[in-house]
Image: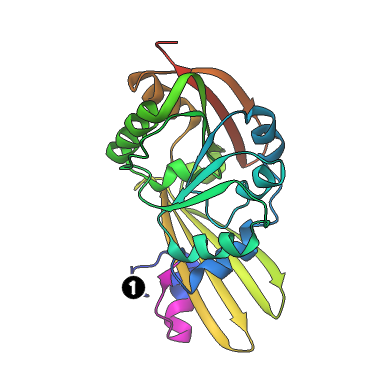
Amino acid sequence: MSGNTIPGTAGLLAALYGLQEKPLYGREGASAYDAIARHDPSEIRDVLRLARGPVLELACGSGRLTLPLAARGHDVVALDNSPALLDLLADRLPADHAVTLVEGDMTAFDLGRSFEVVLLGTSSVCLLDEDRRTELFACVRRHLAPGGHFYLSVLDFAGTLLARTAERSTVVVHEQSVITLLQHFDPRRGVRTTALLRDSVDGRALYTSEVRLVSSGRLTDELAAAGFAVVEQRRGQDGEQVQVQLVCRSSDD
């Protein structure tokens, strides 16, 4: 994605300031992403309620869910494909933790063991297209212990965001920087572009990522086709973006 192809306001700002966007989960973008994500309390209570036995967390990021699990003494394998985010997490783990960090692809991993719980939070499933979601679900089934649970979350969007191209913005002040989160919704392409514009004493930078618009209903159908049954569904407060948490078990259990 270049300044000419970044959609919406973020593209205009890239052209205005002469910015070349950088990957959101790369070495430089990781700290900006972490500043936005790390203080989000959503999912934590439900994840802690569900966690038992060995836990596998996919797309763990900088540890928003990992750290509360580590604080409770859980045996966790935390996997992510971003070395920068894993480095941030490693620096925050308590000295007596039982967390193993793994750099890997959540659609193609083989850890040689099974887990009572597999977690995929923060709507990270939407980073994948349909084919790669199928590969993800196959990997999860191979690693899920009999009777175990697969937890994942997704965002359902109101019609106001899906009827036509739309944008939403949020501003966060973090340490000595101001971070503007720009979300651009393109229902025609079925994607949401996330851009973080970071202004600090060191200058200005733009980080971007693109995710799919996948509803909880569609995800439930895909899970069923992959051999999972949704046994619990929790919906967040009504609004333009509603978090939906799905707890699944293998259909064979």
- Residue 88, horizontal then vertical, whole percent: 57, 64
Question: Residue 106 magenta-drawn?
Answer: no
What residue is disc 1 on? 2
- Residue 142, horizontal then vertical, whole percent: 35, 28
- Residue at image location 48% in from the left, 85% down from the top: 17
Q: Quadrant of residue 197?
A: bottom right
| Quarter of the C terminus within the rendering | top left
Which residues fall within the magenta stretch? 13-23
Residue farthest to the left?
131
- Residue at image location 61% in from the left, 65% down from the top: 91
| Camera-nearest residue between 156 and 59 | 59
Question: Residue 22 magenta-drawn?
Answer: yes
- Residue 205, horizontal then vertical, whole percent: 51, 79
Tell me: 196 left or right of 102.
Answer: right
> 117 above or below 179?
above
| Camera-nearest residue between 65 and 10 | 65
| Camera-nearest residue between 29 and 142 | 142
